Image (cartoon, grey):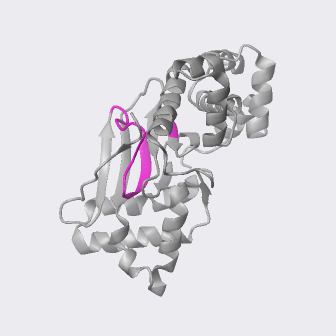
Amino acid sequence: MKARIHNIPTSPGSSFRAVLFEDKEFPAAWHFHEEYELTYIVKSTGVRYVGDHMDTFDNDDLVMVGANLPHCWKTIGEQDEDVECIVIQWREELLSSWFDKEELKHISALLKRAQRGLKFHKKFSEEIKPMLLEILKTDSFDRLILFLKVLQKLALSEEFDFLAGPNFSNSLSYNESNRIKFIYNYLKENHLRNVKLEEVASAMNMSKDTFSRFFRKTFNSSFFAFLNEYKISISCKMLIDTDLSVSEIGYRIGYNNLTFFHRQFQKQLGMSPSKYRKEYQKIPLSQ
């Protein structure tokens, strides 16, 4: 199937939707919808896909995606706790008639930036968390005013990174969307071994050359580089969440050559796996 379109109902008595989602895992496949979406992870870890961007996520992950931008969150491995996250979704027409007003110029610019997806930095997301929780408990007029205050705070923040690449197109064909979903699912199921380009191409009924061209066009990267980025992201999570040795982690994610694992980690993170683990352990638990 292609990235599926989801129809989002509004919350009762409100012109937008705000919910606390709780479940064993994220149920949505790679999908898109007409609504803008703000997602704050209260409790969960895994891999997040927004357009052609892939990264791991953890507690306090705050991401905004624009209208019709394909995305999904996937839990990876065994989870000690259920997923818990705040999700706010709204249509552009909620605010569009106000976009010519000087007071909303920053929010208007925010929504344009969100078409590539935005990840806000952890310290900022922790600061805005109380406002998000308050939206869940507030009704009607006060809820809308608080929501506008959240958007304005997001709009004025410079503590964010773009997710999808500038050349990523929301207008994917059925086949392109289907292929991307297949790749994401294949990596989730097989990332703990040495995945070969040839086997993925074969599983998709494509020649090696055709698959390579498709992948580079879609992700602006080679499959080899994307796979290594995926594996290193998983290794970061394992360095933080487990007491496994660096060598064992390298083997578990499919690197039989540990020198190569260290080289790829250094290339992506600018430090060794051991230093990364030590640096993370220096961060106070309250942060």
Q: In x, y percent, where is residue 155? A: 52, 70
The N terminus, quarter of image: top left
- In which quarter of the view is residue 14 placed? bottom left
Q: Is residue 201 at all visible to an observer of this figure?
A: yes
Q: Nearer the viewer, residue 65 or 6?
A: 6
Q: Which segment is the magenta one?
A: 24-48
Q: In x, y percent, where is residue 280? A: 66, 39
Q: Classify 272 as above or below 261.
A: below
Is residue 190 found inside the magenta-colored segment of the image? no
Residue at 60% x, 45% y is 284
- In which quarter of the view is residue 254 placed? top right
Residue lying furthest left in this view? Answer: 12
Residue at 56% x, 52% y is 122
Q: Nearer the viewer, residue 2 or 283?
A: 2
Q: In x, y percent, where is residue 195? A: 62, 18
Q: Nearer the viewer, residue 108 or 177?
A: 177
- In which quarter of the view is residue 251 placed? top right
Residue at 53% x, 18% y is 203
Query: Is residue 250 found left or right of 163 in the rendered image?
Result: right
Say how many tags the image has.
0
Q: Nearer the viewer, residue 186 or 232?
A: 186
Query: Is residue 150 found left or right of 167 in the rendered image?
Result: left
Query: Is residue 246 found left or right of 83 in the rendered image?
Result: right
Q: In x, y percent, where is residue 207? A: 62, 22
Residue at 80% x, 28% y is 263
Q: Classify 191 as above or below 176.
A: above
Is residue 30 found inside the magenta-colored segment of the image? yes
Q: Classify 78 as above or below 107.
A: above
